[in-house]
Image (cartoon, grey):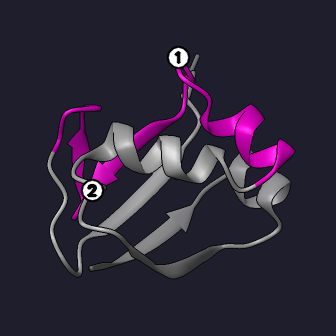
Amino acid sequence: MKSLKLIYFARLRERLEQEGERVDVDDSITNVASLMLWLSRRGETWKQEFKAGSTVRAAVNLQMAQPTTLLSHNDEIAFFPPVTGG
């Protein structure tokens, strides 16, 4: 079992109605992609935001992450929509 700290930014914070949370996940949640799949099963809003092919980005322990980035107990994962600038 892994305990993870999740933080949600921008649109995600609004849509999920929370800034973040601590979750305990099974050891089968090994990387960012499997965590996003797990989150997508929490309900319709979660499914819309974290579905496969989602544009949501992640950072693990303040480092930009890829779907294959491995997760460890007590990691901090921040999720945010892509940001555009001008």
Q: Position of residue 27 (x, y in %)?
A: 24, 66
Q: Position of residue 12 (x, y in %)?
A: 70, 50
User: Is 4 in front, or is 26?
Assistant: 26
Tag 2: residue type?
Ser
Q: Residue at x 57, y 23 (%)?
A: 54
> What element does badge 1 sit on?
loop
Q: Residue at x 61, y 37 (%)?
A: 50
Left or right of residue 12: residue 51: left
Left or right of residue 25: residue 11: right
Q: Is residue 45 magenta?
A: yes
Tag 1: residue type?
Gly
User: Is 53 in front, or is 57?
Assistant: 53
Left or right of residue 25: residue 50: right
User: Is 54 in front, or is 30?
Assistant: 30
Q: Position of residue 74 (x, y in %)?
A: 23, 81
Q: Position of residue 49 (x, y in %)?
A: 69, 37
Mark whose residue sits in front, 2 or 1: 2
Q: Earlier in the sequence, mark 2 or mark 1?
A: 2
The quadrant of the image that shows the C terminus is top right
> What element does badge 2 sit on?
loop
Q: Which mark is residue 28?
A: 2
Q: Which residues are magenta?
A: 43-69
Q: Which mark is residue 53?
A: 1
